Image: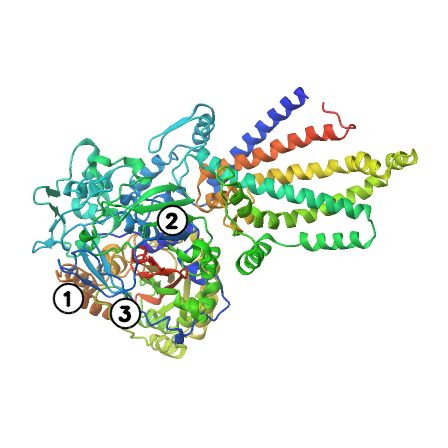
Amino acid sequence: MFRFLVRRILGAAVILLIISALVFVLFYAAPRDPARIACGKVCTPETLALVRKNLAISDPLPVQYWEWLKGLFVGRDYSSFGHCDAPCLGFSFQSREPVLNTILDRFPTTISLSIGSAVVFLIFGVGTGMLAAVKQGKPLDKVASSASLIASSMQIYVVGVFATYLLVDQLHLLDRASYTPFTENPGKWFSGLLVPWLVLSLIFTANYTRMTRSQMVESLTQDYVRTARAKGLSRRTVFFRFAWRGAMGPIITIFGLDLGVLLGGAIITESTFSLQGLGMLSVKAVGTNDLPMLLGVVMVAAGAIVVFNIIVDAVYALIDPRVRLA
Amino acid sequence: MSFSRRNFLIATSVAAAGSTVLSACSSGDSGGGGSRSTGATEYTGAKVTIGTASDSTGPAPEIPGAKTGGTIYGLAPDDFSHLDPQRIYFAYNSTVALLLHRCLTGYKIDASGKQKLVGDLATDTGKASADNKTWTFTLKEGLKWEDGSELTVDDVRHGFERAWAPFVTEGADYAQRALTGKGGKWRDAYEGPYKGKHLDSIVTDKAKRTITFKLAESKPDFNFTLAMHSYAAVPVKMDTKEKYDKKPVACGPYKIKAHTTDKSMVLIRNKNWDPKTDSIRNAYPDGFEFTFGVETLDGVDRLISSQGNDAYGVSIYKGVPAERIQKVLTDPDLKKRSFNGLLTGTYFYWINTKRVTDLKVRQALIHAWPLQQIRQIYGGPSAGDFATSVLSPDIIGYEKTDPYNKSKKPQGDPEAAKKLLKEAGKLGQKVVYAFPQDPTYNKTKVVIENALKAAGFTPVIKPVDSTSYYDQVQQIDNSYDVMWGGWSPDWPTAYTMIQPLLDGDAIGNGKNNVSQTDVDWINEGIKKNAVIPDQMKAGKAWAALDKRIMEEVAPLIPETYQRRFYVYGNKVGGAQFDPNFSATLLYKTFVKA
């Protein structure tokens, strides 16, 4: 297990390094000039040079990249922003605040949104999928399968606006989407995120229902399941102890990836509900050519995906005795 | 004086902040828009005059029915990009600056949107020498910073000198140029205030509370320049340099209690602001709470439904998007909870006079241009009024002149255009039309192409990357005949429009005389009008010049004066359009019982 973890973490570091270099190169390949945007309305060549110096983008690209990498480990000094402690992701070109602080400020919103909706879609998705598998071919299965097909073809920006209009503005059943830190007011945290959770879950639940159903149906036809039943184990024991465990492998894999992506920012959901998470942050960073912020968010998003992949692989071994970590 | 690429920079900077000026009015093409019967087009721009010392004396006139107390909740997609006044230039930053900062002069706006330039920190709009090179202002008594310390003439001077700090790169530079006489090289003339040296061209007298500006050139409208927030006062003793942008010290009616960048801002009363010193601001609410990150459509829907705190809500600077304009115009309750106004400035199309040398061909282009079809794509009559000359209605002295009858034939007059082309022997002339690639202009190019063909031209359409659009059209050897553009003045005198757009001195790469108009009588007219001391008399002279330019040179095709609508919560009173910053005039709002 230890060797596995060390190997995977080193691999992850290399992946993140490659991604950061790619973002750097791609950013500079874009035709927009961040200094020109930050320069304001009166942009003489002298002012532009001053802005480049202030933003620390006057050096050649490899030097800038090296300085950025160095900042991660030893911190960095900026002429116009002051000192940035390690791990330094730089200062935002737009807000002129340390990127790490902004990300740490937004991360709780994204975590709350992701984990909350993950709980909902896992319970409902896997639950409905299992039910549909048990009742294969029966009306319940048909209803669940059709409903999930419809739900999975929905778009968040449509369902979200409709749900807000109906449940919040017209029926006054739920609160308007907002984020209040859990530590500040757990009740408000819950009520403010309920609509986004439900909307985000709707789309994911459908996928998990369909996936769980098909995996379970396949598992239930396996030889070992039939053998267990033949040996006299109860239908319930066989279902949960053997078939379910066998079916969960691929679902965990997809869940790990989904959660990783969600933690990198649920862009459309956050925009639809005006929630200030990493998704909105990344959209704004792209729109304003804010390289340090963009790089920071990309690193967090990529980091989340990589970390969850490692976790998924480890969990695989725990849940399925056929898999051994090497 | 040379000017910046003002309009382009409005477009790009606001784009950077999330949207473009035009997209707010034009993101939908479902047609319709408002109709004339909605009254949407009755407002004809602010009428600006110069106030007296008595007009400058506080307090501000009471708003009938207004009550003190409560909180107004502001919604916006993006946080203010700067709070340090010297770094404020973009209009949306000025919406909050009006609550926090004060300049020597400012605009006193009445309920109908009419404006007077008055003394804000100063007792009046200043005394100029006969040659308008020396301007003296006296500070009002009782001016204080938020900590209770006195606001002095040194603090006012500091607000000018800070513009030289290396971290200040975003503000206006009119005063710096005028104070040094070095044009764009003004930074070379002074090292900034942080090494203990002051600008020789600003003289203060603490005992008399006077500040005198010795300009290198004659500036009869210098008191208008000083109303820009780039020239607001900053306390010498509390200047935190780069950090000031995050936590400025207030002398206006409110101060910052809390600010989480890009998320929220809470303003509370500045108890050391004395309403008797302020003839401009009412300041009825006890505070303001701003929420950022609210997408425009979401924000407007929240204000329309007016639930909870949204009933006390306003949109700080984002207008109603095209998707909701019809709803606002047709629902009587919403219409009552809305206001609108024209954006400052004019949208137009430059005609490259070095390529299109024949006056008759330029006039034919104006006749041919399909203003109505273009405005329909922007959202119909509610999106704005047709422009007929260079000057916009908010300019002092503006007089409507319509030599090409565009008000009566906004759809274009292909017959009149063809006739002129025939007379010139240029029927079938090739016209290269350049525009920034954008969903809206990709649509308007179609109606423009059709109209040009109908008028006997051979159009060649050249879409240009929107991010480098102005860099390309501002090259004097470009290969375009007609180019989309626009211009917003920084203060409402005609010099700020006609000089940068039409003075022969403003021709050059990166400069704004994109039509490359270099006509002796225009150049002389600009010089002459620029030094008329009385701005009202100057306004008349400029209006005459505007008319003659359109008739005898026709260097651009005026398009629209664009309009923006706002809605507000059902418990907000006093909400009105800010004619300078095209936003909600926050300091006049109040909470209804």
Chain letter for mark 3: B
Q: Earlier in the sequence, mark 3 or mark 2?
A: 2
Between disc 3 and disc 2, the foreground one is 2
Q: Earlier in the sequence, mark 2 or mark 1?
A: 2
Position of A3 with respect to B453 (left or right) is: right
Between disc 3 and disc 1, the foreground one is 1
Residue drawn at point x = 17 percent, y = 44 percent? B180
Q: Earlier in the sequence, mark 3 or mark 1?
A: 1
Chain letter for mark 2: B
The crowding category of the residue bearing disc 3, from other C-alpha atoms within 10 Å (few below 14, some 14 to 19, many at least 20), is many
Q: Which residue is mark 3?
A: B550
Q: Is residue A24 visible?
A: no
Q: Which mark is residue B289?
A: 2
Element assignment for label 2: strand
Who is closer to the viewer here, B352 or A248? A248
Element assignment for label 3: helix
Q: Which residue is mark 1?
A: B537
Q: Which mark is residue B348?
A: none
Element assignment for label 1: helix
Residue lying furthest top? A3
Residue B547 pos. (x, y %): 24, 70
The amino acid type found where label 3 is placed reads: Met
